[in-house]
Image (tube, helix red, strand yellow):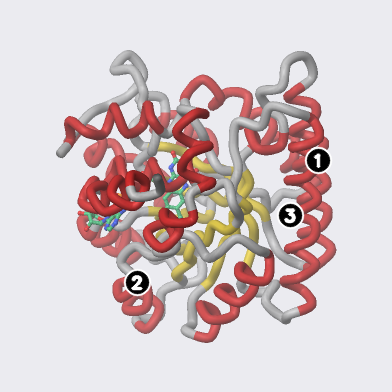
Amino acid sequence: MALLREPLLAAARSPRLRSVAEKSRLTRPVVDRFVAGSTEADALRVTAELEAAGLYVSLDFLGEDTTSAEQAEHTVAAYESVLKGLAASGSAERAEVSVKLSAIGQALPGDGERIALDGARRICQAAATVGTTVTIDMEDHTTTDSTLGIVAQLRADFPWVGAVLQAYLKRTEADCRELATAGSRIRLCKGAYAEPESVAFVGEEVEESYRRCLSVLFAGKGYPMVASHDPAMIAAARSLAVQNNRASDSYEFQMLYGIRPEEQRALAAGGHRMRVYVPYGDEWYGYFMRRLAERPANLAFFLRSLASKK
Ligand code: FDA
């Protein structure tokens, strides 16, 4: 099954497959396991349901690799709107947003980084207004320096902005040491993109790196956000929390919507902060393909629903 990871991640970047898949209504039932729905109302409804079950939420308006300033603007406006919606529905205390900088213009030629920084600032301002936070997702390794640079600039005004570090990158343990400072919210994940071996660990090395990074983050002064469905990583974080005398509100666990939902509820019931990453919107293709690459078990069902479109 590991052999499927590379082709699935390559397919995740194909505009042609994206367009066929996103237009096919038949793929939707498969996708809906991982995505809250198309609309802001869907996102708010699922947020309320998860909050009622004692969970925290990070909402992700789906989209990435934006190719126009208009599309970037549309995404920023969607975030401003959903943040107002969270406040109006009384959900802002437990729900934040996650933002991909490529969705708000980071890769646009010329002044893409400035466009993304301006857009992210507007989203942070909207979050500050309603009393919640923003986490900036991490994409492939070619964007890491640019993304951490933008996070640093955002933190000058909004110190609660979360950064994401990916344990599969060889640089990440050093990044953890640098970023584990007071108040620094760091989401640690394994990493979801196809990366060359020159920059990334493979196989069990990724888990070993994840453990080393967890040790740095839990011993540091920041706020670790343990983003993994892997029982071994969760157990490692739990024992590090005990070893470092961490109060239960000084770190949190995070999982993706639709993946191990019983475990999400069990951790929350056990007194842990558990945040669910909830994607919504129509541009689900890249996100969904990365989930298939992690677990190809759903692939046959998905391909059947695409083929029967004709
Ligand atoms: P792994 O994939 O090894 O899975 C461990 C176990 O979890 C499996 O054995 C299975 O039991 C279960 N499981 C995992 N995937 C499943 C699935 N699709 N369906 C059913 N069960 C499954 N990545 C990134 O590069 N940048 C980012 O910004 C983020 N952001 C992010 C936020 C949050 C909240 C999470 C949880 C994850 C991310 N990721 C991410 C994705 C992350 O890098 C990684 O690809 C996935 O979390 C899968 O890695 P795990 O640590 O879960 O382990």
Q: Residue at x 65, y 63 (%)?
A: 39
* 252 horizontally vs 170: left or right: right
Residue 89: x percent and y percent? 73, 80
Residue 143 vs residue 2, the one in the foreground = 2
Q: Mark 2 falls on what kind of element?
A: helix
User: Which label lies toward us, 2 or 1?
Assistant: 1
Mark closer to the chain start, 1 or 3? 1
Mark closer to the chain start, 3 or 2? 3
Residue 73's disc number: 1
Mark closer to the chain start, 2 or 1? 1
Q: Mark 1 falls on what kind of element?
A: helix
Residue 153: x percent and y percent? 74, 34
Residue 173 vs residue 282, the one in the foreground = 282
- Kindly identify which residue carries mark 3: 79
Residue 198: x percent and y percent? 32, 13
Q: Residue at x 53, y 46 (%)?
A: 23
Residue 278's disc number: none
Residue 182, visible in the rendered structure: no
Residue 261's disc number: 2
